[in-house]
Image (cartoon, rainbow, N blue to C red):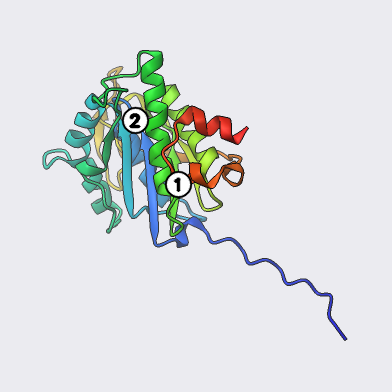
Amino acid sequence: MHSNAVTPAPSPKAPSQFARRILLAVSGLSPQIVTETIYALAADEFDPFVPTEVHLITSAEGARRAELSLLSDDLGWFHKLCTDYHLPGITFNASHIHVLRDARGQPMSDIRSPADNQAAADFITAQVRAFTADDGCALHASIAGGRKTMGFYLGYALSLFGRAQDRLSHVLVSDPYESSYDFFYPTPYSRVLQTRDGQLADTAMAQVTLAQIPFVSLRHGLPSALLAGTASFNDTVHAAR
C-alpha cells in the first residue's frame, strides 16, 4: 500500500544562520546610518542579525567622512560600537567603502545629472549582483542613507537579484538624535551630546528601530547570463519585464 502523504518542504534558512552575512548600505554625508543599522540588526529580539562584513556605497566626500568618523583612531565609532555591544568578527575597513564612479570611471562627488544617475544605478546594481552570486551568504541592504535615488536603486537591485535569505530595511531614529551629527547609536552608558538646535540629549535614551521592507524577487525571471554578467541596470530591468 502506497502512502499519499506529502513530505513538507524544509523551512527556509534564516539569514542569521548563514556563515557569511553582509550588510550593504548607501550613504551620503551621514555615515551614522552604518552604526545605527548594525545596532538595530544586532538588537532585534526575535532574530538578531550580526553581519560578518559591512560594505558602504557612497560619494567621494561620503567616503572621507565615513573613514574619519567610523574607522579613525580618534573617533572610530564603528569600533566603539563593536566594543560597547561585544560584536566581534565584523569586517569593515577602508576597502569596504565603495566610491561611486561616473561614466569615465572617476570618483563621484554627488549625483547631479542624468549621466550620474545612470552611472550610480549601474554601480549599485553591480555590487548587489556580485554579493547575491554567493549562495553561501545572506545580504541585508539598508536604504536609510544617501540620496533618494541611491536608496531606490539599491532596493530595485535587490528586487532584481535578491533571494529568499536577503532582506531590505530602513532605520528609524527617535528625536532629537536623528538630526545630530554626533549621534551614532544608543550607548549602553550615559553620553550627553548637543543637537543642531542646541538641545542636550543623552544617547543612552535614544531609540533606533529597524523597519523591514518587503520586496518582490524577480531573480527567477532573469536569464542566467544577466545573473552572472555585467549588464547595466537598464538592460537588467528590460530583461525582467
Give neighbour class at mark 2: few <14, some 14-19, many 20+ (Cα, 10 Å). Answer: many
Residue where numbered disc 1 is placed: 228
Q: Are marks 1 and 2 in contact (CB under 8 Å)?
A: no
Rendered residue at 42%/28% (across/down): 121
Rendered residue at 51%/43% (across/down): 161
Task: State the separation of the CA atoms marked 1 and 2.
Answer: 26 Å
Q: Is residue 122 left or right of residue 35?
A: right
Helix, strand or loop at disc 2? loop
For marks 1 and 2, the one nearer the N-term is 2
Residue 77, located in which quarter of the rendered image?
top left
Extreme top residue here? Answer: 113
| Residue 173 against residue 115 in the figure, above or below | below
Q: Amino acid at mark 2?
A: Ser
Helix, strand or loop at disc 1? helix
Q: Position of residue 17 (x, y in %)?
A: 46, 62
Rendered residue at 46%/40% (across/down): 209
Q: Amino acid at mark 1?
A: Ala
